[in-house]
Image (spheres, rainbow, N blue to C red):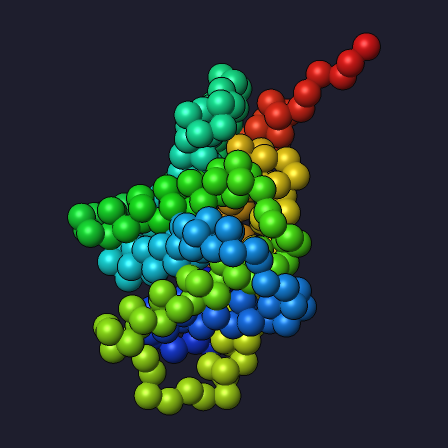
Amino acid sequence: MWGFTYILTTTMLPPNPMFLAAVRALGGGVILLFLARDVPPRAWWGKLTVLGTLNNGLFFGLLFVAAVRLPGGVAATFQALTPLFTVLLALPLLGVAPSRVKLIAVLAGAVGVSMVVLRGGAGLDAIGILAAFGSAVSLSLGGILLHKWGRPSSVVSLTAWQMLIAGVELAIVAVIMGDVPTSLSATNVLGLVILAVLLTAVPFVLWFTGIQGAGPSAIAPFMLLTPIVAFVLDALVHRVLPSPLQALGVVVVIGALLLGQFADRKPAKG
């Protein structure tokens, strides 16, 4: 689902990244809160603020900064490092040491994504690089803390409040930066609804459910599929045939995911 975000952004949404990030978080949060109709206990508000800022606020904001300042391939490659950061941070924060096979799998996946999305002569901007790096670390850390802290109520409620907190933060940034469109077309409105509901609310509920069920180190590698899906959709919409290297990169990513899942399997008890 996240892979559809890129093609939607270029075909249906206004060119206002911070506004899009705010609407994405607030819209998704309102929908989920309507379904959950739950207020978390007061003791959890500090944790929710941290989780919302990491998983949605910083992640969305820095991701859009990177997308603006870097070629798409470079930004996507940094996002492909999210599983590696997750595996490495899980050791000091959760006490979970990654296996050698797991490390090989996530590194191979990042290489595969690079083969698919990188182009020759890609420009490197210092602020863009830092933003891309920060967004990947932010999502990794947020997922680990979510797994460590658990949840006070349903996953839907937990996701809703995180998004609402992030949405307020991003809305303030959008207003300060003046990154708000003066008007919206019907296509823009439809695109914003799709972005908030189908590409934000639904996948984040699934993402957090997976993290709490299987752990962040097992779930994070699936993020490698996001740039792959975006690449395939772009090729289909714009009719750009992949090169042999790009096709091989897709195979490497899928193989890395399979290898990573094999590494996560626990031996059966006799």
Q: Is residue 55 visible?
A: no
Place of residue 116 in the rendered image (x, y in percent of width and height, measured from the top left): 43, 44
Report the quarter where the C terminus lies: top right
Report the quarter where the N terminus lies: bottom right
Place of residue 124 in the rendered image (x, y in percent of width and height, measured from the top left): 21, 48
Image point 46% across, 49% down: which residue? 47
Q: Residue furthest left?
A: 126
Give the vertical position of 129 relative to 34 (above or below): above
Q: Residue furthest front?
A: 42
- Please give left or right for residue 68 compared with residue 36 in the image: left
- Please give left or right for residue 199 compared with residue 120 in the image: right
Give the vertical position of 106 relative to 152 (above or below): above
Place of residue 127 in the rendered image (x, y in percent of width and height, measured from the top left): 20, 52
Along the line of sight, the residue nearer the viewer: 243 or 129: 129
Which image quadrant is residue 184 in?
Answer: bottom left
Which image quadrant is residue 91 in?
Answer: top left
Image point 55% across, 71% down: which residue? 30
Image point 51% across, 76% down: which residue? 191
Along the line of sight, the residue nearer the viewer: 199 or 22: 22
Image point 61% across, 41% down: which residue? 212
Place of residue 74 in the rendered image (x, y in percent of width and height, measured from the top left): 32, 48
Q: Residue furthest right?
A: 270
Q: Is residue 217 visible?
A: yes
The image shows a total of numbered marks equal to 0
Give the vertical position of 45 relative to 89 (above or below): below
- Please give left or right for residue 62 compared with residue 236 in the image: left
